[in-house]
Amino acid sequence: MLGRTLREVSAALKQGQITPTELCQKCLSLIKKTKFLNAYITVSEEVALKQAEESEKRYKNGQSLGDLDGIPVAVKDNFSTSGIETTCASNMLKGYIPPYNATVVQKLLDQGALLMGKTNLDEFAMGSGSTDGVFGPVKNPWSYSKQYREKRKQNLHSKNEDSDWLITGGSSGGSAAAVSAFTCYAALGSDTGGSTRNPAAHCGLVGFKPSYGLVSRHGLIPLVNSMDVPGILTRCVDDAAIVLGALAGPDPKDSTTVHDPINKPFMLPSLADVSKLCIGIPKEYLVPELSSEVRSLWSKAADLFESEGAKVLEVSLPHTSYSIVCYHVLCTSEVASNMARFDGLQYGHRCDIDVSTEAMYAATRREGFNDVVRGRILSGNFFLLKENYENYFVKAQKVRRLIANDFVNAFNSGVDVLLTPTTLSEAVPYLEFIKEDNRTRSAQDDIFTQAVNMAGLPAVSIPVALSNQGLPIGLQFIGRAFCDQQLLTVAKWFEKQVQFPVIQLQELMDDCSAVLENEKLASVSLKQ
Ligand SMILES: NC(=O)C[C@H](N)C(=O)O
């Protein structure tokens, strides 16, 4: 066993137990074997092998660049990658080859990471299931775990084992599936309303959303500029901290990055001294839709902190219930403005119609965007109309301030970290998920994650346990702005207590391999 985590495999590389090329080839072969998950839109095999070769030379010459040198990583397909197609899972950008790397991608490459490919998502990151992109939905690797498949058969008497596959959550579901299927050791997602934390929870991973301004957004194709942040998906907290260490810092190309964050997260987190902590439990997060399993794990987690001497306090974030509707107004308004550039002239796809400029614009956008994107543009333009602007957009900005202030008040009352669920329940089967429309789904799925983006705070989802059906459940920790390092120390302590991630993930991979060996099922899946 070479290493299940980035840290472990990095040690194996340093000790010469494996070379970057061997590691790269192992991951490439897993990418091919797990193609049916639809995690990748583009596999950059040649690029990765070339990078591995260079990394190998550095190791041989004793010039390794550090923990990320030779480590296979994947990047969500809404980050620009020089010379590699970047589609945002949209017809609008199919075939677009950016001439530059997003700052975060460049930073990973500068540290010697190997770029395995670009991962699948909801079109332009608008969604929470990774089901609404032009390349089709992403399948959750946990759909193939022995325990889940046995349970489903027993519950539904299903003959077709492949019909019950689960969503990954989203919109960074491709990145989550890529990490949990062991095709890479870390992946970049983006997080505007929960898009990194939600798939992390559904796929049994750590999903970290840094403070807004800590990590550059340059080259991340925007959804909501005022809330987007690059997110990190890994198998454990230390790995997330290593990647954050590589990515954090000011960028002259993104004026919203800060120059002097309070705590510089450049070290591996130590274990928090829990007895000195005050953990806040926001009472508004106890909603009737919360599944009993998540609820009970949430309460057990609070008890765990208490039993170790932490103070656990109920707190109130009184404007929480407005966050989804407020997000809808702000998100769609920013979307309407951001998407205006895709008109067939400035950027993206262009249709053949040339009877008039207006007809060309309209047909280009109809062909280029799916219903979800067009629907959001339409709502956004409505909110931005001169006669609606004050009543909708400006009002939503004011509500956003109230939501952000709720967090400030909670932290000012002495709370160090908030503990909440990440999602309402475990991942659901695809066929169940698509019964609802994109907007309703996002409203449900972002319920515990969205407000954090309004406030620009750091938050992390940690896998806690398997549900009765054998599926992962995550809980979320939210920290003070720019106290990302402190947040990770708490998350690390918690991770150590619950002992979830890597062992379960290894078992999952064994189950997946069993599935792959079952030729019939593998060929059914691979056709899709
Ligand atoms: N990228 C995100 O966080 C997206 C969010 N779930 C939305 O649909 O807007």
Image (cartoon, helix red, strand yellow):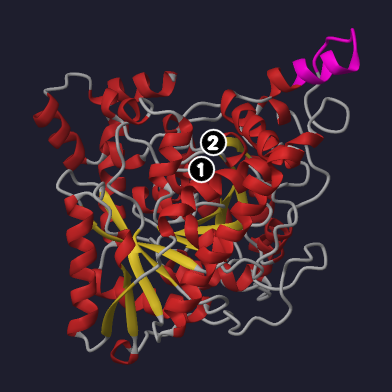
Residue labelled with disc 1: 171
Q: Is residue 89 magenta?
A: no
The residue that appears at 30% across and 49% down in the rendered structure is 424
Report the quarter where the C terminus lies: top left
The kind of secondary structure element at disc 2 is loop
> Which of the 4 image quarters holds residue 339?
top right
Report the quarter where the N terminus lies: bottom left
Q: Residue furthest bottom?
A: 276
Mark 1 CB within 8 Å of ligand 1:
yes
> Seen in the image, is 93 located left or right of residue 528?
right
- Mark 1: amino acid: Ser
The residue that appears at 35% across and 19% down in the rendered structure is 524
Asked if residue 465 shows in the view, the reply is yes
The stretch in magenta equals: 351-364
> Seen in the image, is 217 located left or right of residue 285?
right
Residue labelled with disc 2: 122
The residue that appears at 17% across and 83% down in the rendered structure is 307
The residue that appears at 27% across and 47% down in the rendered structure is 425
Asked if the residue under mark 1 is in contact with the one under mark 2, i.e. CB atoms within 8 Å, the reply is yes
> Which of the 4 image quarters holds residue 526?
top left
Label 2 crowd (10 A; few <14 / some 14-19 / many >=20):
many
Report the front residue among 391 and 153.
Answer: 391
Mark 2 CB within 8 Å of ligand 1:
yes
Q: Is residue 389 above or below residue 339?
A: below
Q: Residue furthest top?
A: 355
Q: Position of residue 452 (x, y in %)?
A: 50, 62
Q: Is residue 363 magenta?
A: yes
> Seen in the image, is 279 located left or right of residue 24?
left
> Which of the 4 image quarters holds residue 389?
top right
Asked if residue 134 shows in the view, the reply is no
